Structure formats: C-alpha cells, structure tokens
Image: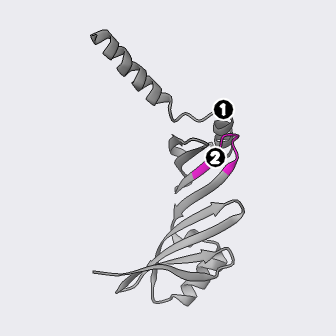
Amino acid sequence: MKKIIILLVACVVTGTAFAYDPNARVLKAFKETFSAAENIHWQEYTDYYSVSFSYSGIRSKIQYDMEGNILGSTRYYQPTLLPLHIYTKLKNSHSSKELFGVTEVTVGDDVVYFVKMQDARNWITLKVDASGNSSVYEKYRKG
C-alpha cells in the first residue's frame, strides 16, 4: 500500500511539474521576441497559455493561442513611459493630480491605458485610448 501511495504522489508531482510547460510553438514565439525576459512564469489553460515576466524593467503578461499567436497582453509601468502625446495630454489636463501607474491592455490591434492618479482626496483611474481620449473609469475617496 505504501508503494502505491508513493507512486501516486510521484506521478502527481511529476505531472504538476510539467503542467505549465508551453508547447514548442508557443515557447519558440516567446523566446524569439523576449530572449532577455526574466522571472518567467507560465500557466496553461484549456485553449491558451499565459506567461508573466519582466522585460526591460516592465512587468508584462501575454496570452498565446496554441499555435504561438499572441491573443492579448498586459503591461504595468510608470506614466513617463506612456506615448508622449498621451503623457503630455494627461499632465496638462490633470495638473493637480499625481500620475503614478499605468496598466496597458492590448487585444488584437486595440490598446487601452488605465492610468492611476491621485490627489489629496481621491484615487482615480482614467481609461485612455490610443488617441489620448480619456474618461474616468473608477474613482475612490481616500480614508
């Protein structure tokens, strides 16, 4: 009985160790583009893979289909890394607020930026499109 339990545990551990390895196409697509990526963590889902990593100091997450094509991505970075026309527009239109974080979401050819900012009383997230048009996505009053 002990041997069976040990064998089952070994199978589960071995199966878990390989559960998040991407297929060869996905791994090749990732390595060709992000050869200098660090802190790489893979997750496997029913019909896609997700990889979280750091690249050039930016935390990122990409979803690949089973053929190695990018489905979408998310990147987290400082506002100064926004496209210049968006950064300038936000700084001018919200000069009394501190910009402190960006979540960039790309699906297909569409890019949306969620820009975190704060003032003395509120935390605000703006949803900004690629042209720099923005709207308040969420707003919370501080304590």
Would residue 77 be found to the left or right of residue 109 on screen? left
Pointer 2: what residue? 64
Q: Residue furthest front?
A: 1
Query: Against 86, is 62 above or below?
Result: above
User: Picture quarter containing residue 120?
Assistant: bottom left
> Where in the figure is residue 143, as x and y percent of width and height?
27, 80
Q: Residue at x 41, y 25 (%)?
A: 12
**Would you say residue 129 sits in the magenta stretch?**
no
Q: Amino acid at mark 1?
A: Ala
Q: Residue at x 54, y 72 (%)?
A: 114
Image location (x, y in percent) of residue 17: 46, 29
Q: Residue at x 31, y 10 (%)?
A: 3
Task: List the residue tagged with mark 1.
Answer: 24
The residues tagged by marks 2 and 1 sit, at their Cα atoms, a distance apart of: 12 Å
Q: Is residue 43 above or below residue 19?
A: below
Up-down relation of residue 77 to residue 72 (above or below): below
The stretch of residues the image draws in magenta is 62-70
Residue drawn at (72%, 63%), measured in percent from left and top?
Answer: 109
- In front: 49, or 128? 49
Q: Is residue 69 left or right of residue 5?
A: right
